[in-house]
Image: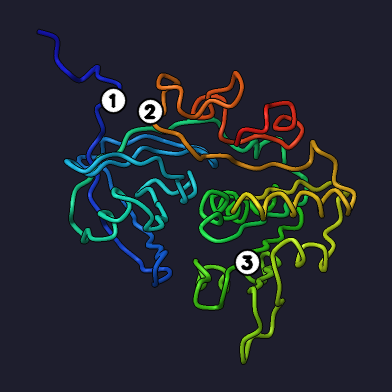
Amino acid sequence: MSHNVDNIYLPKLARIAHIKEEIGGERAIKTFRLEFVNGDGFDHAPGQCAMLSIFGRGESMISIASSPLVKEYKQFSIMRVGRVTTTFHELQVGDVVGIRGPYGNQFPMDDWKGKNLVVIGGGVGLAPVWPIVTTALARRADYKNISVFYGARSSRDIMYREDLEKIRGQATVNLSIDKAEDGWKEFVGFVPSNVLDKKPSPDNTVAIVCGPPIMIKFVIQNLQQLGFKDEQIYTTIENKMKCGLGKCGRCNVGTDYVCVKGPVYSWAELKRLPQEY
């Protein structure tokens, strides 16, 4: 009988080293730092995902939210929306989970060296693009101006709040909330409107956007209005990924299995696919 070490679905073991509650409420978000048991891990690139599993409960594909320059742990920010993610929110530091990956392609950060970066996120959509920000800041000399746009429903719903404050000075941080609040001094309105208000220049610039589909749609429209070309805009589509191996067919968009050829696409590439995402 063959040993199961060759089973591509067999996860590695990782221990929860740290948990941070980012946002409370009905759609709570927690950030988990996972350390591989016995150092049996893997490297990843910005934009890639991993399949996280809770034994007896199931698996869920989650974007890796830490920079690949961080070797000690993998970070995941998880919104409580389903069976697996709800169980994740009940776990404690020291608990062991399964992890397999990494899956998918990556943001072409080497191609972006010498360019301005405009990183745009909404809601939990900041997590998939956060490795771009942290990696670019760690290699600051490789990139020109770095701007981060992030929006949430209210000031209480802003994830990575402390981290966003820390990077001010190294990057331009543009926060927004949907409705006015007492004491809020930054933009009030949706993320696409904040982008249009601040008017980032398309000259020698790449824009990366991730968030709710409706936000992505209008952010891209506004970037185009500002003069960004399709090849200058990148996004990530992670919805529906299940097996991570291009086998189950759940994530295919046209002929593309997103878990293999995606989830990172330029807008020029994505426009050539059927509008099924």
Name the residue at 74% across, 61% down.
192
Name the residue at 58% across, 50% down.
129
Under circle 3, the secondary element is strand
Residue 63: x, y in percent?
46, 45
Distance CA(mark 2)–CA(mark 3): 31 Å
Query: Relative to 150, is 141 above or below?
Result: above
Point out which mark residue 151 bears: 3
Mark 1 vs 3, N-terminal side:
1
Name the amino acid type tagged 2.
Cys
Q: Which residue is mark 2?
A: 243
Could you tell me which quadrant the N terminus lies in? Answer: top left
Q: Residues within 10 Å of mark 2 (few under 14, many from 20)?
A: some
Distance CA(mark 1)–CA(mark 3): 36 Å
Q: Are marks 2 and 1 in contact (CB under 8 Å)?
A: yes
Q: Residues within 10 Å of mark 1 (few under 14, many from 20)?
A: some
Residue 27: x, y in percent?
42, 64
Q: Which residue is mark 1?
A: 9
Most extreme residue toward the bottom is 182
Under circle 2, the secondary element is loop
Q: Nearer the viewer, residue 205 or 141?
A: 205
Residue 76: x, y in percent?
40, 52
Query: Relative to 252, is 167 above or below?
Result: below
Name the amino acid type tagged 3.
Gly
Mark 2 vs 1, N-terminal side:
1
Residue 95: x, y in percent?
18, 53
Mark 2 vs 3, N-terminal side:
3
Name the amino acid type tagged 1.
Tyr
Query: Relative to 165, is 260 above or below?
Result: above
Q: Nearer the viewer, residue 237 or 15?
A: 237
Q: Closer to the observer: label 2 or label 1?
A: 2
